[in-house]
Image: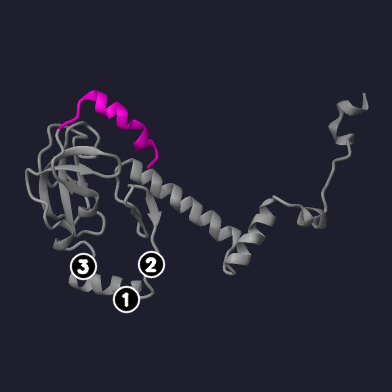
Amino acid sequence: GGYEDTSLVKKYRMTDEEYDSRQGTLRDWGRKQKETDPTFTLARHAKEHREMNEAQRQGKLGLELPKGFEYDEQGKVIRVQPDEDENVNDENNAAVGNVEFGPETVAGIALQMRCEARPGTRRGTVAFVGEVPELGSGGHWVGVIFDEPVGKTDGTTKTGKTYFQAPGPGYGGFLRGKNVEVGDFPERDIMDELDDSDEDDEL
């Protein structure tokens, strides 16, 4: 009878000292991290974890990665350390145009070239190379017409300006030059796509 009323059951409460002495707890892990990095805090770790999850989500959607993230050679999203003079560079870029995504970032990429785009191994044909000021932080972009509807646009930006014409919604995409590799990339058949699906899930 008495145990049907849970308010009568005495709850076990661990003291702060007991929790502090336990191994394998979040607090214990945080202490070990602080030993190797004196600036470590759980709050900062949680914030960076959220930022990485968001960057990976955007990467899977084929969107431009947030500032401070890029793809490594395997196509995985990684965090990059900002330069100490990053703020100065940002001010200079604003004054003289976006140097970070200048014409050299799309050098060697030309119209009608076959290409493969990251994230994933999406294939298509280059349909535009140049500046798109209304996209992201501006600068130079590569417009790609994909073989399959794996993009985010049909070649028209949200402002209504058309830079190239894809055969339908989702067949086009605007990508930074670093995410486009040009070369001999013929269209795949459906069996090739199935073979690649596991790799795409790891990005």
Query: Which residue is at a point 39% across and 50% down the rendered structure image?
Result: 55
The amino acid type of the residue labelled 1 equals: Val
Mark nearer the N terminus (3 vs 1): 1
Horizontal placement of 164 versus 177: left or right? Answer: left
The amino acid type of the residue labelled 2 equals: Pro
Q: Mark 1 points at which residue?
A: 88
Residue 121 seen in this snapshot:
yes
Query: Which residue is at a point 25% across and 35% down the rendered structure image?
Result: 150
Q: Mark 2 points at which residue?
A: 82
> CA–CA distance between discs 2 and 1?
12 Å
Q: In which quarter of the image is residue 33?
A: bottom right
Q: In this view, does 63 lie above or below 68?
A: above
Residue 103 percent location from the top left of the image: 14, 62
The amino acid type of the residue labelled 3 equals: Val
Q: In this view, does 203 lie above or below 34?
A: above
Element on which disc 3 rests: loop
Q: In this view, does 124 lie above or below 21?
A: above
Mark nearer the N terminus (2 vs 3): 2
Residue 99 percent location from the top left of the image: 21, 67
